[in-house]
Amino acid sequence: MVKTLAEVEYYKQNWLNDPCWDLENDPNFKEYYDELLSFRLEKEKEWKESYSKRLWLKSCQMGIKGNLILTEYILNIENRLQELIDKAIQNEGY
């Protein structure tokens, strides 16, 4: 059964809330394969560009302008450290 444009748009919005699958591979929307593939690739490109810009700005704030690999590494360590702190606080009953 061919899906309506409203159903396709609803499907896209659901995917945006949880983009953990390849949008275009759903057999219920096979008639819209090209459109869905294009949509997914465009969104992934936007997200990657946005992430790179945020990383660039953070590298400037850290004084390591443009060193995105080091910036990402430091941010990952900071996030992991915060997770450990939060877990320690939970375990101590604070």
Image: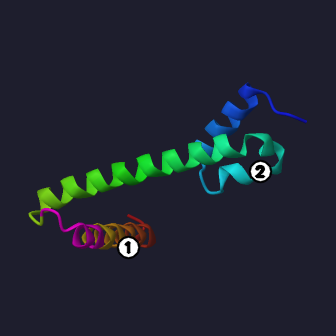
Residue under label 1 = 84
Q: Decide: few, some or many residues near mark 2? Use Cα within 10 Å; few <14, some 14-19, many ≥20.
A: few
For the point 75% across and 31% down, the residue is 7
The segment highlighted magenta reads: 65-73
Q: Quadrant of the N terminus?
A: top right
Q: Is residue 68 rendered to the left or right of residue 45?
A: left
Judged by its main secondary structure, the magenta piece is helix
Magenta-span inclusion, residue 69: yes
Residue projecting furthest to the left: 63
Q: Earlier in the sequence, mark 2 or mark 1?
A: 2
Residues at marks 2 and 1 touching, judged by CB atoms closer than 8 Å: no
Residue beneath disc 2:
26
At mark 1, the secondary structure is helix
**Which picture quadrant has residue 79?**
bottom left
Residue 39 among those drawn in magenta: no
Is residue 40 visible in this depiction of the protein?
yes
Report whether 91 appears left or right of 13: left
Q: Position of residue 48 (x, y in %)?
A: 40, 54
Residue 68 in the image: above or below residue 58: below
Residue drawn at point x = 25 percent, y = 71 percent? 74
- Front residue (pair 55, 35): 35
Question: Residue 80 at x, y = what percent?
Answer: 36, 72
